[in-house]
Amino acid sequence: MCRLFQHVLLCLAPVALTAADLHVGSGQTFGTVRAALAAATAGDTVIVHAGVYREGSLVVDKSVTLTGLDRPHLDGEGRHEVLTIAAPHVTVRGFDIAHSGNGTLTDVAGIKIANTHHAVIERNRVEDCSFGIYLSKSHDSVIRHNEVRGSQTRAESNGNGIHAWSCERIEISDNRVVTHRDGIYLEFATDSATTRNTVEDNLRYGLHFMFSHRNRYRENTFLRNGAGVAVMYSREVHMESNHFAHSWGAAAYGLLLKDMSDSRIVGNTFDHNSTAVTMQNSNRMVFERNEFRANGWALQVQSSCNDNAFTGNNFLGNSFDLATNGQLELNRFEGNYWDKAESYDLNRDGVADTPYRPVSLFAMLVERMPSSLLLLRSPLVHFLDRAERIIPSLTPDRLIDLKPAMRPLSL
Amino acid sequence: MKRSRKFSPATLALAALVALAGCGDTQPKAINYGRDECAECKMTLVNQRYGAELISAKGKVFKFDDLNCLLAFEKKNAAGPAPQAYVVDCNRPNQFLSSDQAILLQHDGLRTPMGSRFAAFASETELETARTQLGGAGKTLRWPDLLRPPSAEKTAACTTCCSAEKKP
């Protein structure tokens, strides 16, 4: 046993001997971060004390830990990419990073992690940068507990808050991203997790997936983003327990699904969106235990969608539960609670004794003639919808929930 | 005699002018970035360096966020008279280049909204400046190169589906 300890100690000894703390700040060993980085060797910790550091573009090309004490401020003065990480196993923690330059053809960021791996970016504040935190061809990295705030005066050069391009196994968690172009953007990012982030007031999408397969995102909150959340051209994306709210506008959606397949949407809440979920050309998607509350449209499903299942969801107080431009006969609706269903339950098994057709006649009409939306709440429309429910003639006859729940489901 | 005077040449010319003005307008329309939606991929247009428009023979305008969206849309809606195509000048926000004016650079460093990696320029010099900024290399193309069948020019005519599969 004692010998084993000796071995362990011997193994640790070289690391302990070489890893040094390099202090940066006024009255410290190093006056600038650049000087400390030049002197550092792999495994060292550069401790930056409070103060404002205007050092242009800093490049971290050694495997070091950069720690900020009392939030030192690294400033790009509107001209530089503030911090570029080009070595593996770099940690950046506790900094205020602000005022990056604008990219012309290339993207400029507050913190860029390029062509490396195992970077950890945590507890930083990134403000008024073109792109906030930017990963490019970097795998196994973690972005957590950061606050990323874009500048609305940057207009077209305001990029994405957290941006990952061509990365594997990235963890993006507990960040807050506001007023960027897209809050969190993943393109060609696979096997990654996006968890417990708060993403608000971004110009376009709160979260945007492009060509990004096998990802999970859960427990995120997306509020008031210009067009909501877009998950596109991807497969096997698991979306669970997220909150999509207040996406209002003609082209705004809680969740836009386009060219998606084999994904699960489970336990999410959609409330107060013009359209909660819109789906185009998406197949084999499973919607379970979601709540759709007070949206204009709960679901807009295009005829190009097949083999999707909607089971055990709650539909409460939406103007329209479902709109479609086709028949949707290859999709399954079962065991959902629809507050518009009026039925009875003689055998008291909790399942309504009459089926429910989620597409109303008026929803069909609005789909073909958007201007007829003017007649929403008109007594005539109400009458026609009722008549259609009793004797369906125009609504898709096989689009039907045969076992609607009598009471809202506890999700 | 009186009847023929009713249709004087001036009236006819005016009528013709009105008729032409009604249907012959194929000028591109300004893109409202942050609001307009791509006719193909449905994404909101935000990046002012990229974008394209198709204007149908009847004057209907379709806006796109990236060149491959325009090409995919054109392919799907090939019936009828050919529409006029325009691309956004990479160096001048909201100015358009007609498809025969535009010189295209395809470069891996160009992060276009739908991954086509195409940017359009008004002149060779502007294109070369951009190429230098991006660190050289890349490919210069003209519009007809895009319309070649995929087998002959796979990367150029790449539609959204195959760029999705091709990981950079």
Image: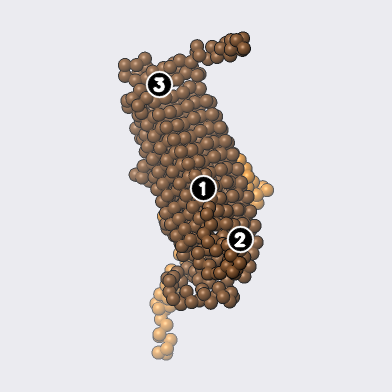
- Image quarter where the N terminus of chain A lies is top right
Q: Spatial distance from mark 2 to mark 3, Cα to Cα?
A: 58 Å
Q: Are marks 3 and 1 on the same chain?
A: yes
Badge 2 vs badge 1, beta-carbon distance below 8 Å: no
Compared with A87, A197 (above or below) is below
Residue wearing tag 1: A241
Q: Nearer the viewer, mark 2 or mark 3?
A: 2
Indicate the colour of chain A. brown
The subunit carrying tag 2 is A
The amino acid on which the numbered mark 2 sits, given as a three-letter code, is Glu
Letter of the orange chain: B
Residue wearing tag 3: A47
Residue wearing tag 2: A334
Q: Quadrant of residue A131?
A: top left
Q: Which mark is residue A75?
A: none
The amino acid on which the numbered mark 3 sits, given as a three-letter code, is Ile
State the residue at coordinates (60%, 44%). A213
State the residue at coordinates (35%, 26%). A70
Q: In this view of the protein, which residue sits in the foreground, B167 or A41? A: A41
Residue A21 lies left or right of residue A349; in this view the side is left
Residue A250 lies left or right of residue A191; in this view the side is left
Q: Earlier in the sequence, mark 3 or mark 1?
A: 3
Crowd around label 3: few <14 · some 14–19 · many ≥20 (10 Å): many
* Position of residue A394 measured from the top left corner of the image (x, y, whole percent): 58, 74
